[in-house]
Image (cartoon, grey):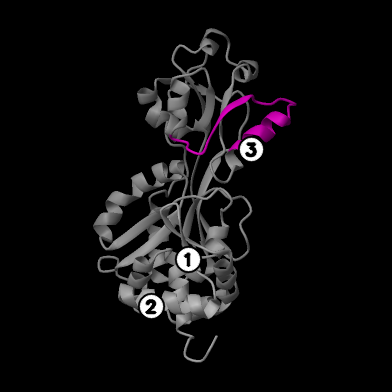
Amino acid sequence: MRSGDLNLLLHFDALMTTRGVSRAAEALGITQPAMSAALSRLRRLFNDPLLVREAGGWQPTLRATELHLQFRPLLDTWHQVSLPRAEFDPATTRRVVTLFATDYVQFTVMGRVMGQLAQQAPGLEVRVMSARPQLGLDMLDTNQVELIAGYYPNPAANLRSRFLFEESAVCLVREGHPCLQRPWSLDAYLAYPHVNLAAHTRYFSDQLDQALAAQNRARRVRLTLSSYMAAPFAVGNSDLIATVPLSVANALAAQAGTVMLAAPMSLPMLKVSLYWHERYHRDPAHAWLRNFIAERFHRASDAGPARQRRA
């Protein structure tokens, strides 16, 4: 990088992190025209557009992603040594924290957190990013988000985690489903087509299929959804069977017209944690938010007693 251009690294990092000129300018405390000028200089410097419009937002080019990974160690060191040493005050902070979570985790976590968060830290904005199927914890490594809430069994060594909660999965069928007229068993479960909840990590659906494969059995998948919250409504108007987290089933059974049944086989608990990159571990605002969220889940327990029907 040419002499005098080193400060552009911070502009580049802000653009890659926030995926927007206005948000990057806000993050660095400069004007939007100044950030636009920095982006123009960066494009000339690297002979690449760096950020391009895609699906209503800005997305990095392959070259931009490669450069950001190359500069990451230098940027991480800079952020660590330049963190403010003053005690963090949530009541006066002005901060945006980006987070990725599936709609299920947004439902279980944000609903419990946001009321008190708005009272204690009115200037702190949590911005939940849309998911991309090919990405997961890589979004932390490339600094696209600062936090991920979900389940990842094998996080990288440079990531930290904090457990939030766990809950069981149950089966959903519509009221009047023919399976309710026969004994509920694994055979009844597999006699009808299924909703596959692939979401964006696939861990939930993979564990379900692995449990069946261990018994030389398999589901017939008729519908694959990336949304947990849509599953009860797809089930409520069909003969499909869905296996969903208990909290989702409890919340939407009445609206969707569905009946809950116990899973006809042993399934591992759904375990949700917060994940973050080492670069943010000592950030006082980040640490405060992590602790605030975790305190809302100080007891690892199921979402509550379910009204399950056993045929």
Give left or right: position of 217 versus 280. right
Give the total number of marks visible in the rendering.
Answer: 3
Task: Give the labeled residue for mark 3.
Answer: 207
Q: Residue at x 25, y 60 (%)?
A: 122
- Farthest residue in the top direction? 181
Residue 46 image offset from top left, x and y in percent: 54, 77
The kind of residue on which mark 2 rests is Ala
- The residue segment tinted magenta is 205-229
Q: Residues within 10 Å of mark 2 (few under 14, many from 20)?
A: few
Q: Nearer the viewer, residue 47 or 293?
A: 47
Q: In 3D space, how far apart are the residues under numbered discs 1 and 3 (Cα atoms)? A: 37 Å
**What amino acid type should be assigned to the residue bearing mark 3?**
Gln
Q: Which residue is mark 1?
A: 51
User: Which numbered disc, 1 or 3, marks the residue that appears first in the sequence?
Assistant: 1
Which residue matches tag 2? 37
**Residue 39 screen position, x and y as percent:** 43, 74
